[in-house]
Image: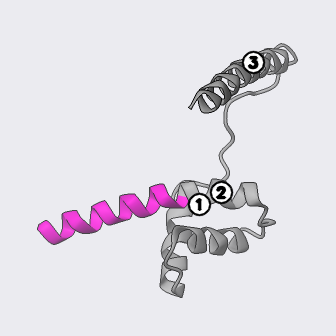
Amino acid sequence: MKALEKKRDELRAEIKALRADLKTVEAAIRIMGGDTSPQRIFKRGQLKRLVCDAMREGAESNRDIALVVIREMDWEATDERVRDITVRVKDVTKTLRGQMLALKKA
């Protein structure tokens, strides 16, 4: 247990240092006139459309849907990109499920 607590504390310290580094880098970018806001990678409604298309193609899991989206966008399927798009797909499928439930109740 002590080893896990020690590792947790080390990770917290590392995260704190990384956050400080990120703030420094973002400040430097702003000073040089750059934009530090998150960049949009999909146009409005594009991801939802791609998710629906992937589901029509038979993709069932969020990861499978994400892989179809990545293929359709002609992106390289790196581990990081697959994780990122899978999280975004999960948000869309959750919203779609909620909308379907609302329609069934109506």
Point out residue 56 in the picture as x, y percentages from the top left corner: 48, 84
- Label 3 or label 2, whichever comes before in sequence order: 3
| Magenta span contains residue 96 | yes
How much space separates mark 3 and mark 2, taking CA atoms? 24 Å
Task: Name the image quarter holding the C terminus.
Answer: bottom left
Q: Which mark is on residue 56?
A: none
> For the point 33% across and 65% down, which residue is it?
97
Name the residue carrying label 1. 86
Q: Nearer the viewer, mark 3 or mark 2?
A: 3
Q: Is residue 90 left or right of residue 103?
A: right
Q: Is residue 11 left or right of residue 106?
A: right
Name the residue carrying label 2. 83
Residue furthest out toward the right: 32
Q: Nearer the viewer, residue 30 or 4?
A: 4
SS for callout 3: helix
Name the residue carrying label 3. 17
Q: Residues within 10 Å of mark 1 (few under 14, many from 20)?
A: many
Q: Is residue 81 left or right of residue 63?
A: right
Q: Amino acid at mark 1?
A: Thr
Q: Residues within 10 Å of mark 2 (few under 14, many from 20)?
A: some
Q: Are marks 1 and 3 in contact (CB under 8 Å)?
A: no
Residue 95 higher or lower than 17, as above or below: below
In the image, the segment drawn in magenta is: 89-106
